[in-house]
Amino acid sequence: MRESLRIFKALSDETRLKIVESLLNGEKCVCEIIPFTKRTQPTISIQLSKLENLGIVESRREGKSVYYKIKNKKVIKILEIIKDDEK
């Protein structure tokens, strides 16, 4: 139950939801997420940090870039169900 609450709390924020949706197609660096969300780099970084702390995404550094991907596979399933209902 706690994990479900954590996931839904994370996805209840529009910016975090857009970030996670942008990661459905695979790993991306912050610079690739910004245009999808139409938010500033500091805003994206703050929200990615929250998502990482909640166990939703994970990151890796490559040079100066930080790449993120969805860590919790349940999140992918939840978003796929939601997207199917929107069609």
Image (cartoon, rainbow, N blue to C red):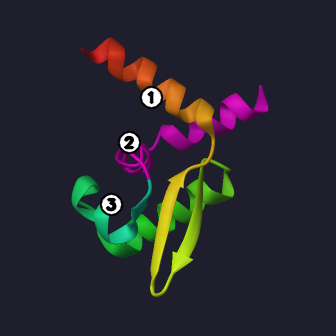
Q: Residue furthest right?
A: 2
Q: Which residue is mark 3?
A: 33
Where's residue 23, x and y in %? Answer: 41, 48
Give the Cα distance between marks 1 and 2.
8 Å
Q: Which residue is mark 2?
A: 21
**Kind of residue at disc 3:** Ile
Residue 21 is a magenta residue: yes
- Pick the front one: 17 or 67: 67
- Dot 1 surroundings within 10 Å: few (below 14), some, or many (20 or more)? some
Give the Cα distance between marks 2 and 3.
10 Å
Question: Is the Cβ of the residue at disc 1 closer than 8 Å to that at disc 2?
Answer: yes
Image quarter (top left, top right, bottom left or bottom right) of the C terminus: top left
Where's residue 57, x and y in %? Answer: 58, 53
Place residue 32 in its image quadrant. Answer: bottom left
Image quarter (top left, top right, bottom left or bottom right) of the N terminus: top right
Q: Residue at 47% across / 67% down in the picture?
A: 67
Residue 56 is a magenta residue: no
Q: Earlier in the sequence, mark 2 or mark 3?
A: 2
Q: Residue at 29% across / 70% down in the picture?
A: 40
Q: What segment is highlighted magenta in the picture?
A: 1-26
Q: Which residue is mark 1?
A: 79
